[in-house]
Image (cartoon, rainbow, N blue to C red):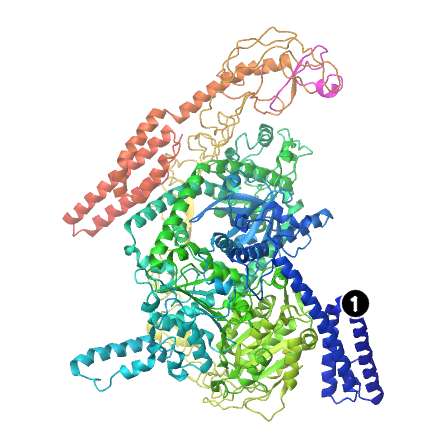
Amino acid sequence: MSVTTFTRPGSQRQIQEILSSVLVLIQKLLDCFPSSYIEINAPLVVIKSTLDRIQRQHITVDFEMLNEKLSQAETLMDSILHRWQHSKDIEAEEEDNANPPDDFRQIPIFPTTHDLHLQLVQQPFLRSNKKQGGYNDVQHYLDVQFRLLREDFICPLREGIAEYLQSRGIGEKYKKLQDVRIYHDVHIVHPVCTSDGLAFRLQFDVSRLQRVRWQASKRLIFGSLVCLSKDNFETLLFATVDERNAGELQSGFITVKFQHYQENIRSIPPTDSFIMAETSAYFEAYRHVLQRMQEVTEEEFPFQKYIIRTEETVEPPRYLRGQQYDLTPLTRDVNQKAQEEERFQNWRQRLRPRLGLFKDIDSSEKVAKTKVTIEDIQSWPKPDVFHLDKSQLTALQTALTKEFAVIQGPPGTGKTYVGLKIVQALLHNKAIWERRREPSPLLVVCYTNHALDQFIEGIGKFHSDGIIRVGGRSSSAQMQKYLLKNVKAAKRRMMPREVLNMVHKTYDNLKQYKSKIEKTVYNIQLTEKGVIHERNFGNDIISDQHFERLQLAHIPDVKDGSLIVNWLGLGSFIYCHEDGRNPDHTVANEGLLPQMEEVPQAAQHNKNDQNAADDDTLDEEVIHVEEEAELLMAARMVDQNEDDELLKETETDPKTPVRLALDLESLTIVEETVDDSSPDNQTENVNDNQWQVAGMNNKKRKRLIERNLTMNDMMTKEEAAQIRDIWALDYKDRWRLYRYWVALYCNNLLKLIHHFEDQYEEEAQKLKEGREMEDLQVMKTASVIAMTTTGAAKYKTLLQEIKPIITIVEEAAEVLESHIVTSLTSGCQHLILIGDHKQLRPSPTVYRLAKGYNLEISLFERMINNRMRCDCLEWQHRMRPEIAHLMDHIYPELKNHESVENFDNIQGIASNIFFINHAYEERHQDDNMSHSNVFEAAYAVALCKYLIQQGYSPSQITILTAYTGQLFLIKKKMPRKFFDGVRVTAVDNFQGEENDIVILSLVRSNIEGKIGFVGIENRVCVSLSRAKKGLYILGNFDMFSKRGELWRKILHQMGNSVGPALELYCQNHPNSDHIKASKAEDFYNAPEGGCMQPCDYRLDCGHVCQRACHPYDRDHEEYNCTKPCPKKCPSGHQCRQYCYQNCGKCTVIVQKEMPICKHIERIPCFKNPRDQACRSPCDRILPCQHACSNVCSAECTTKCREIVKERKWACGHINTTECWQSPDKCYCPAHCNTLLECGHKCAGTCGSCTEGRLHIPCTKPCRRTLVCGHVCHDTCSRSCPPCQRMCQNRCLHSRCKKVCGELCTLCNERCDWLCDPGCDRYECTMTCHDPCSRPPCNKRCQYGIEKCHHRCIGLCGEDCPTKCRICNKKEVTEIFFGNEDDPNAKFIQLMDCSHIFEVKALDAWMQSSSSSDGDKDIQMKTCPRCKTPIRRSKRYRSIINSILRDIEQVKQLVRGSSDIIERMKVDLNCQLPDLRMAERIFARCIESQLENKNTEEEMACVQNQVTFVIKIHQLQRKIIDIERVWNDDDNVDQYLNEEVVKLLAWIKKTKKTHH
């Protein structure tokens, strides 16, 4: 029931009784349960608010009685709070006097296992940061600050890991955690070279992070701390994010830098899987500050009497003893251009001695007014002399005369302006405070990069030389000349030569080691770009058993000689046995992809890729919004190392020994076409670099392969060892096994560069030291050094060396105390803090530490709390009075400067300030723990559009939001074309800035009544004080008034300026009905910013404006009339353009007669027929009596295209050809079709084959069986080159790892063929590759079969067959050779294919010759059943070795003599200089060809090519001489050149040797 319903007397009595009863109940609760005061505080606030509303609505109740009871309850509440605070003070005092358990200087910066599991045993030792009062000594102070700051980044990690372990214990593996982000299946991939040393690339599982918008997400921001563990965080690896790329994050890759664990990291193989926990704390800032606090000694700690003992009386700086300051520069406005002043002074100085001018105007009077004894405040001029108000002058005086100054600047009071005046005075009088022998720059420190850049730009207006901006990636063009790296580059010649030499030498060494490391890393990166060929995998990667099974597949025409490509399901072939049987465990690759489980995931992945693409498109179409990730990155990037940029430019040799069986980047996917009529031509037109696939959509397949290559889900070593048949695996497990092989392969590569990594780290450290020496030399020459607090912590060593005397801290109230203290050096004599603790305070990571231990209290605020003098600026120069009035509850004494009294009212809106109240609920965003509100986003954009339509520039409008989650929602609704220039940002990022009109979205609106940090006074202060002329706030103010005391006061003060609808009016028709805009759709009633009435403005063209009423462009200077143009051309045709467009030329098509040929042509009206070419058919008859086929305006054709039938050539063929192809001019085009010696039909024509006398080379596939057993894939006419397939030769000990065409390395292991222990008849004493020295033993094996215990059917000394004569009778006795059913038959099982044969028959088979003409057939013997080559057998080893020796001899003959090949290469290298002069590109091709393993025949062909090209080059030079003699005969010159060019092009083609 609302208060407004109590209008009748009975209802009024009812509300009085309810309120009275509630107040009595509250008093009873406070008496009985004092600890419930926290829960009771909210109802008391609501009752007080209710009483105020009752009184405003004139409802008759006993206010005196109710107010008395309310006062009693509040008094009781204050008493309880006082007692509680007193007890807290006692506890704090006891806690403060407690002795720490250990020396903070010995505590490691990084968390330990004890730190992360501490809460299970005890709480960490912490003491509060003192709001008031001093510390015992420096040790006490630093101990408190150190432990609080360290706990601030450790606590979230500790609590997050504990929550993660607890959720895993109860089965909630993927529960969302509050304090950390967990990443699963993390692998360390390879090192990354940076100028600071080695970083490492990690890969993590992104399958559960598909909704993350990496561009905006705060995940894995630069500098974030991550913790890796593979044993539930019992052992830890810490790293910080070193480089962040949103595109790579989407694929699961991030670059990190490990801390202190380099040796351990290198020993971790890529197969190891980790869990990674991330805390969002910016660890770099913590680390530098914590290290500095451990290093500070009591002797070098400055300002101890103020910071430690909190003394109130502040003394002047030590350098200031009765000195006079020249304050003349302060009499000029800081914003005036210094260049104009300098020109005036130079002009005056030049004219004064020459003309005697200005003698009557002595400047001593003016100097006397502006030169003051700095400590004598009474002698200072009035404030207006310095363009200051009274409070600003007082602050300036304090800053210059006190060694520890605190200046508070409420919103709009000009604290930055005063700060610039302070710097100007100090720099102008630098001689007073600077050391005589050692120059000392002034140090300026700010919390954010943006504020620092603004401050430095202000200094640059009056002091442009000697400024050095340390760190930051400033986008401001004015800041570029101040950046440290640019100043250092300009002063490079001033550096000591020994420093430059050391840096240069170290940098060169660093590049060399980087090149060596990255050559190996490049090979690792290739594993993400394609499928690695199996020949790159050694025995330690693919086991012998797996490699055997891989080679058992009978796959014709394997792509690039690789079986892995087809095993992974990327080909279109089916693995089946030679006899046509398709085993049960075998899967056709064509059927793998559609049935696999990965397809839905891939579809989801593609969807995410599409979403990412949509986001990129969206970013191009909408306005730019400062994403939180982008802002954090800018704040955290302390410096952009120039060495990183130079190292990126270092070229790495792309050549690599790694061979990709399938390279995705160079593939063109084409559909495989099937033509039953010509099976030989199915792949004839497909290029070598194209990829033939069938079945699934090829683009999807390629994306699927890319996904599989980058996934990190792989088999374990144990899983891989259990697999017997790799062809029996499903699609998903094949890829998992492949990725396991790749991980082992990468690990082997990484072992090769361990030595270079040590050297790289050593050189990187030297380079860092050298760069610091350069930085020190440059910074010592500066007059102003500017850096952020994080930069000051990072460059602490240099600052300690420079020892700035004066330090000015802007935004001091936003900085943690420890950050300011560590930026001070022992040489600091003067500290000036400028800020405002009532706006933004420091933001610790842990809320408990901020509130319970006062960590949010800055040094600035602590000094004020301890009654140190603080000069507060009083006059605000920003906000119109109505807006400034909102600050009364925070700054009661804030006054309005006269400059803000006469601001114009906001056009089109009835109020300059208004709070739009609503109850639309918010939405929570899981990933960034933020909130958004759809209603407020739509309303803010609609209001912004309306304001632009009123004539305001987009740059005059800012949309602020309390939560970053609202930014992206607003961004999506603001097209760049219309809203470009409007700034949309979060409140915290707009601190210190202002704009004419501010639209504020508070976001929070929920049934729980949670208002979050929107209720914090500091943020309320910043939010309400950014607007100069107009402020419009969206929020659920009913909820805010109940939950926030400050909001309740502000809303009570606003009165009628709070409501559900904003009142709009039309500037052109102010008396028309006003629009009540309660939602975004209501702005449709003012479509152009005015009202719904038509504009009715008569344009210069005579038409009427078609728009609705619009206040912008009232004179219609920018309006484009879109009615049809009424003008006509001289021929009477109507103009086809819009009215606002230029009429141009008449393009109506008309018929006109051509003046020469008299044809009628249809041409545009504006064209003259004399200038138009006739396009009618030509009427002329050619000499052949056929009509010309060209158009009238073109020359008659010289080649008649008419078809002439049955013309007879001299060869006797009768052909139908075009007219110009006569028998006396052209070769016969009839197909040759002669049967060549190879058995194929000739593909040439009668003419090209010179009437059958010389046929063109055959281009059909060769298909001959090579000596190795593989099929030749080259063209028929070429000599079969050495086979490039993987060699399949192997013995019982090992397998050959070369390609077939190379000579095999002989096995030198001892032959292990010997009889069984019961026989002991024979034993071979030779090596494996020699003929055996023993005969076969034909005795029957004496052993039994292990499974059934029946007697073995095999032979002595041979491997026992797996089949039993009794158990497998049908299979064993199946008739093949004829003697299998003999009861005494003995059998032998082939090791290569597992088939079993009767031994006598197989002996005869092995000893027989397959050649019918009696010649020796050089080819491996094959299995009689399946034709698998027999390569391993003890009994037939002599036969196998004999055949292998013959094969090796054939290989040698094919390749030729290696000595001759080397001599040819030497001769060719000698010819290369002449070849480069003739043909540079061709010479490069020859150089690369010489690096390959060529045969003698191929080298002879190359040698002939080179010789011919050089000879032709000499011939061309002779032609030039001929031109000089025959300069009048152009035909000879042209003919010779044409013939030479044709010959040269033919020779440079890749030559092939033919049969």
Magenta stretch encompasses residue 1389: yes
**Could you tell me residue 1459's position as x and y percent?**
34, 24
- What is the residue that sits farthest to the bottom in this orientation? 1071
Q: What is the quadrant of residue 217 in the picture? A: bottom right
Could you say which is closer to the camera, residue 600 or residue 293?
293
Q: Above or below — where is 509 with respect to 1006?
A: above
Magenta stretch encompasses residue 1332: no
Q: Above or below — where is 39 with respect to 145?
A: below
Q: What is the quadrant of residue 209 in the picture? A: bottom right
Q: Residues within 10 Å of mark 1 (few under 14, many from 20)?
A: few
Could you say which is closer to the camera, residue 255 or residue 147?
147
Could you say which is closer to the camera, residue 597 or residue 877?
877
- What is the residue that sits farthest to the top in this orientation? 1321
Which residue type does callout 1 highlight? Phe
Q: How many marks?
A: 1
Residue 464 visible? The answer is no
- What is the residue that sits farthest to the left in this orientation? 1525
Question: As drawn, is 273 to the left or to the right of 1508?
Answer: right
Question: As drawn, is 769 to the left or to the right of 73?
Answer: left
**Could you tell me residue 854's position as x and y percent?**
60, 63
Q: Above or below — where is 1351 with respect to 939?
A: above
Give the residue pinned by disc 1. 33
Q: Residue at x 34, y 33 (%)?
A: 1501
SS under mark 1: loop
Quarter of the image where the N terminus is located: bottom right
**Could you tell me residue 1519's position as x and y percent?**
20, 45
Question: As drawn, is 1151 to the left or to the right of 729?
Answer: left
Point out the stretch of residues depicted in magenta.
1363-1392
